[in-house]
Image: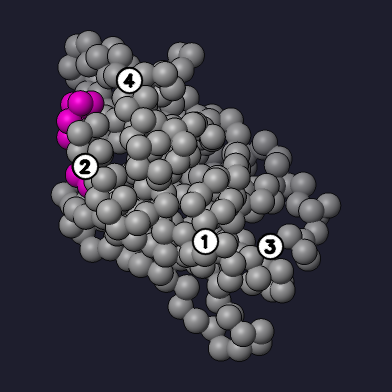
Amino acid sequence: MSSIKIALLQMVGCGRDKQSNLAKGELFCRKAHEMCADIALFPEMWSIGMTFFDPAIEGDRERWNNLAIRHDDPFVDHFRNLASELNMAIALTYLEKWRGRPRNTVSLIDRHGNIVLTYAKVHTCEFDDEAALTPGNDFGVCALDTRVGEVKIGFMICFDREFPESARVLMLQGAEIILVPNACTLDEPRLIQFKTRAFENMLALAMTNYASPKNNGHSIAFDGMVYLVPDGAPRDTLIIEAGENEDVFIATLDVDSIRAYRQRESWGNAYRRPRLYGSITDERVESPFIRPDATR
């Protein structure tokens, strides 16, 4: 297959104004299409601009909960129609209506307008506003039909990147590219986390963050291929890093080269010892990691 182009839609949200977020999101998607993107990736929880409620304001939590939407909401349908019109996949993020507390969700809409994968953030920030959310309960990967062929896509959302298990599970399920909607201020250690997740799983990773002043931008993409020549000198896997401003940034990924790299190099799944990793799935939490606000 030829190279695939992922548009990182680095924007400032319009708060809880869903219609304004819809209009701005469409504008940026159309710009991505003009730049020949195959996939447009939104920042985290775009439908409400990654906003939460103020517990000090009476009734604000209920008003916030009422902003949650289902897959058949007109907001989602609008972007399904847009994806079909533009012949471009769209990774759309929103506050999802759910049983009890809502979820922080992304749906991957293919270029035909079909939802082919929906993922809810597994590692919600329970020490912060996201305690109001229901965590997701699974990671998933799908084969996305693009204009240049199929590619296997998985998702992490923001805090998911802090846990190497997230990307590892996606790799084990066959992901070739991980897309990451994000909403936080990104410093060097966190940017390096994205680079590391790509390297240790031999896959590409593309992340979209909110622009300044909501966050600080720095949407970024890595291809994960450290050694293009076996036993050769290491290379920088950075494909693109945005500044802090609003814009559409294109990450061009050579999927054929990534696949060839995965065939020959030693990371990934070939030399793992899963029988020795039982403690990774042990539910017990010992000091100093006990947190009263954490759930399992």
Residue under numbered circle 3: 268
Residue under numbered circle 4: 74
In the foreground, 282 or 68: 68
User: Mark 2 vs mark 1: which is more N-terminal?
Assistant: 2
Q: Secondary structure at mark 1?
A: strand
In the displayed orientation, state which residue is furthest to the bottom: 232
Camera-nearest label, 2 or 1 = 2
- Tell me, for residue 204, which label it has, or none: 1
> Looking at numbered disc 1 in the image, what kind of residue is underneath it?
Ala
- The answer to whether residue 114 is seen in the rendering is yes
Q: Position of residue 226 (x, y in %)?
A: 55, 76
Asked if residue 255 is positioned above or below residue 29 in the image, the reply reads: below
| Label 3 Cα neighbours within 10 Å, binned few <14 / some 14-19 / many ≥20 | some
Give the residue at x 40% y 45%. Answer: 88
Q: Is residue 16 magenta?
A: yes
Q: Position of residue 102 (x, y in %)?
A: 41, 21
In the displayed orientation, state which residue is furthest to the right: 275
> Looking at numbered disc 4 in the image, what kind of residue is underneath it?
Pro
Asked if disc 4 and disc 3 are in contact, CB closer than 8 Å, the reply is no
* The N terminus: image quadrant: bottom right
Residue under numbered circle 2: 27
> Looking at numbered disc 3 in the image, what kind of residue is underneath it?
Gly
Does residue 72 appear to the left or right of 55 in the view shown?
A: right
Asked if disc 4 and disc 2 are in contact, CB closer than 8 Å, the reply is no
Q: Secondary structure at mark 2?
A: helix
Q: Position of residue 169 (x, y in %)?
A: 64, 48
- The answer to whether residue 181 is seen in the rendering is no
Query: Looking at the magenta stretch, what is its main secondary structure?
Result: loop
